[in-house]
Amino acid sequence: MFENKDTFKATFLDRLVSMHGKEVQETTPSDQYQTLGCMVREFISSSWVNTTDFYEENESKQVYYLSMEFLLGKQLKNNLLSLGVYSICKEGLMELGIDMEQLEGKEPDAGLGNGGLGRLAADFMDSLASLNMPGHGCGIRYKYGLFEQKIMDGYQIEVPDYWLKEGNVWEIRKSDQAFEVRFGGEVHMREANGDLFFEHINYEPVIAVPYDMPMVGYHNETVNTLRLWSAESIMKDFELSELSNHNYHKIVEYKRRTEEISEFLYPDDSTEEGRVLRLKQQYFLVSASLQSIVSRYKKVHQDLKEFSNKIAIHTNDTHPVLAIPELMRILMDEEGFSWKDAWEITSNTISYTNHTILSEALETWPIELFRTLLPRIYMIVEEINERFCRDLWKKFPSNWDKISDLAIIADNQIRMAHLAVVGSHYVNGVSKLHSNILKNQLMKDFASIMPNKFTNKTNGISHRRWLLVANSCLAGTITEAIGSSWINNPTALQNLTNFSNDRGFQEDIAKVKAYNKQNLANWIYKDSGVVVDPSSIFDVHIKRMHAYKRQLLNVFHIIDLYRRIKADPNLVITPRTFIFGGKAAPSYHLAKDIVKLINTVADIVNQDKTIRDQIKVVFIKNYGVSDAERIIPATDVSEQISTASKEASGTGNMKFMMNGALTIGTHDGANIEIAEAAGFENLFLFGLKPEEVLRYYAEGNYIVREVYNQDPRLIYILDQFINGPLSKEKADFKSIYYSLLNHDEYFVLKDFSSYVETQNKVAHAYVNQEEWLKKSIINIANSGYFSSDRTIKEYGEEIWKIKPMR
Ligand code: 26V
């Protein structure tokens, strides 16, 4: 159906009418999207089946990437390009009077993630398939993705994101491959012939039904699987009536309790109910995935003893770490393995990535809650803990402090990161700096007793999605200069170095950027009514709203710049458009105040005619993957200004680099490796070093008031929050004021001076376009290392021990 334009057009029209039961001219862009999507999925299906068969026939080792988040965004354009049929479709549709971009816009973003961790999982799926590696994802098919962010009077309002409203053309429901997951109840233990047997009774069953989505490799006919589980109640009437004793209300309650497991991503965990639901989600994902993996394994292989030679299971952060006790349970209770053998298999199968050192994000569960919900799993975790503590006792006799520091269960809590480290054969951080902090600080004692477990895998991004698809103009310009080999081998972008001084090429790059900026300016006007000047510097800060990411520092610079322009009517600066986007967690009040602050500053600045449009501030509402794809190609300056040591890696930083933006950033996460790759002279690094931040924390000797009192600019800015125009807002900016002056946990005031100085250097540098473009080209040329293909090859070779298959 995609052989050529004519067959495509004929099939498309035929399907359009038969699917929607309307005349062609009555169909909507949404109908047309559905039709094209279904055609593509059908087209993929034989390669999909073949890939699965091929892996099975070859008994190749497979990796399963378990993640509570997959931030997929849209699939259509990626899939069409990967299949090599994008042009045929685009031109064919054009001849039918249908605009491809409008049709692409009808696909809902699959927003099944919060930020970097979820997008990383999606880019990893892309690389696994494109590298012909047998790797699949396991996640949850949330009915509602991350909330839709509306802005009302400058405030963030959260609205459910019902992304499945019109169905999902990419998924296939496989009800014949459903599994039962059990919650609550009691465990009975009995002994027979010297062996212990465990029976789980009076539990509440939930049915996990898989929905499979194809993960299409680039031009290679490999199609891997992303399996998303949906929670359903038991369907058979007799079982239902058994369960509820013919009580209608109980059936309804039971249905509600089960179905809510896959309803929302990140339910509100500020309440006990929310926390229980989150733990239920985690076990639901893990239990369904492991049952499915083991059952598939048994179809292909004889002996479960070989499990860890044929299967690798990766846990994306601690969220799926119950995979460890769940695999133990299956191997012991269902397959009859001894503890020792089950442990050997389990710990050789599982590996774990840590994505944050922020203490509030390191998961722990109260014992009571955990034991009530997962009684058998709790017993296994308890046993893992006891055996581990016994080993510790041998290493550190009588050192109770050390043992309780390292224990999995302590202070009435189960520490998921400790369980992850003990039960995995590899633990990795996501940038050199982050991995070093894990090894030398956060998990120092673990690393000293298990030195070979800890490793680094610097994150990466899909250069296909973030360059080839998101910025086709730049991709085309690059290919004209150096050929297309970079698409399969992104380090070939290095060849662009030869063009960094080439005036003609610099001009081409400048034209692409100008074109993307104009497009973004048009879109911003449509979206928010703000007119922005495409010749101004587009300075972009897009990521989750969080104190450590320091959107506040950026706002401080804007307020200072605004004051300078107001104070001197003759001051001429390099015009700048500050663009923000990001969601604040619904119960994170400070982050929500920052959203309001940005919108308030935007209103004041954008309406002030006296500053002659020299600065503009835009807050993009409901920022998501598709927005990133539009904004990043149009960016001049990439804001990566987290407090040093706090951003594990960052991946936005890599996307901007690859699209030719210059970074203003701290010595944090992957920024450092980006600087090492591109040359420190081609970025703008500033601020405290990670070791300085860590020393201040350890010694507790950062005195905010000292910094504040010595800098009149800071006194002026902070005064705005309580006395100036900002204080007139109904919003409570006082909380920001006090959080900074009392504590300033993230060193906003401390880094302010260095940040402003560096921003002035940025403004100055932008004026010399020739130098700027040279730096931009050198950034692009050195971005190939940050392709997730490199990252996935490293995971494949060093952790999972899997190989490309074709
Ligand atoms: C999550 C939350 C959720 C509730 C509010 C507080 C809070 C604080 C931190 C987190 C982080 C969860 C883990 C995470 O998303 N880490 C990100 O992982 C990316 C991929 O490795 C990495 O690039 C980012 O630096 C890291 O923040």
Image: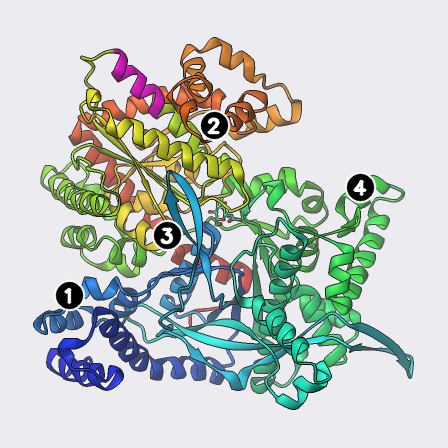
- The type of residue carrying mark 3 is Gly
Q: CA distance from mark 2 to mark 3?
A: 26 Å
Q: Position of residue 548 (x, y in %)?
A: 50, 35
The residue positioned 52% from the left and 61% from the top of the image is 264
Residue at label 1? 99
Identify the main secondary structure in magenta. Answer: helix
Q: Which residue is mark 3?
A: 624
- Magenta stretch, residue numbers: 558-567
- In this figure, which residue is indicated by the disc labeled 2? 733
Mark 1 Cβ and ligand 1 under 8 Å apart: no
User: Which residue type does callout 2 highlight?
Assistant: Phe
Residue 196 lies, in percent from the top left, at 86, 77
Please report whichever mark, 1 or 2, sits nearer to the chain's N-terminal start: 1
Q: Return the disc, 3 or 4, that comes first in the chain's sequence.
A: 4
Instruction: Identify the disc placed on residue 610.
Output: none
Q: Amino acid type of disc 4?
A: Lys
Work out which quarter of the rendered image holds the N terminus and state it: bottom left
Residue at image mark 4: 402
Q: Secondary structure at mark 2?
A: loop
Distance from Cα at disc 3 to Cα at disc 1: 23 Å
Q: Name the residue: 44% across, 44% down.
A: 544
Of labels 3 and 1, earlier in sequence is 1
